[in-house]
Image (cartoon, rainbow, N blue to C red):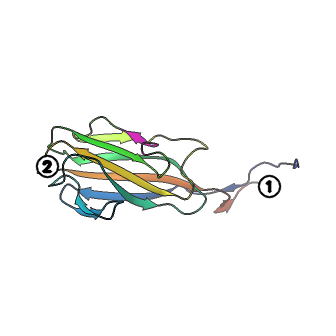
């Protein structure tokens, strides 16, 4: 059934989740195995659930920053969700310092899902630090009202 629409009056702030890690930090991967981010764990990609978004949320942007270079021949990073492992970032090699923007998928972002990061490196790291920032909004939420009806 069609409904009569009126102009939008509600607004909300964009929320941010931040996940910072060092090459030698440890975390359980999705399989429940304790792994590091490059100190000893080498080879096949490990998938980590790095954030859980609130129900009704939608990713609208973010970044993967390399604060300290990962000193390995190759450091492949994917950022996505349980439906699409590289929905937000598909990298060939992100070992040098710098930043990569996450894709902003209007209308198709994660809806209350986990954000997952997959890392595969070709040899052992002795340095490296990264930070993932996920920007999101929650559908049907308003923090303030502006204008007249």
| Quadrant in which residue 71 is drawn | top left
Closer to the camera in the image, 125 or 6: 125
Q: Is residue 55 left or right of residue 140?
A: left
Taking 83 as reference, is 53 above or below it?
below
Q: Which residue is mark 1?
A: 148
Mark carried by residue 125? 2
Mark 1 closeness class: few <14, some 14–19, many ≥20 residues within 10 Å: few
Closer to the camera in the image, 50 or 19: 50
| Quadrant in which residue 39 is drawn | bottom left
Q: Is residue 107 left or right of residue 133?
A: right
Question: In whole angstroms, how far apart are the C-alphas of marks 2 and 1?
Answer: 58 Å
Labels in figure, total: 2
First to last magenta residue range? 85-90
| Residue 133 on the magenta segment | no
On the image, the x and y values in percent for residue 79 come to 39, 47
Q: Give me the residue at 26% from left, 36% from top.
A: 93
| Residue 89 on the magenta segment | yes
On the image, the x and y values in percent for residue 121 come to 21, 44
Q: Give me the residue at 18% from left, 45% from top.
A: 70
Q: Is residue 137 left or right of residue 117?
A: right
Closer to the camera in the image, 30 or 51: 30
């Amino acid at each position: 059934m069609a409904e009569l629409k009126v102009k939008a009056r509600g607004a909300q702030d964009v929320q941010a989740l931040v996940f910072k890690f060092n090459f030698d930090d440890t975390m359980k991967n999705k399989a429940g195995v304790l792994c590091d981010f490059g100190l000893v764990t080498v080879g096949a990609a490990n998938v980590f659930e790095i954030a859980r978004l609130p129900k009704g949320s939608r990713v609208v942007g973010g970044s993967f920053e390399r604060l300290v270079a990962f000193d390995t021949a190759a450091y492949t990073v994917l950022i996505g969700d349980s439906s699409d492992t590289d929905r937000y970032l598909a990298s060939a090699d992100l070992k040098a310092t710098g930043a990569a923007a996450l894709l902003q998928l209007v209308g198709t972002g994660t809806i209350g899902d986990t954000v997952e990061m997959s890392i595969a490196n070709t040899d052992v790291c002795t340095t490296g630090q990264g930070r993932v920032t996920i920007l999101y909004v929650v559908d049907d939420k308003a923090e303030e009202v502006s204008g007249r009806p």
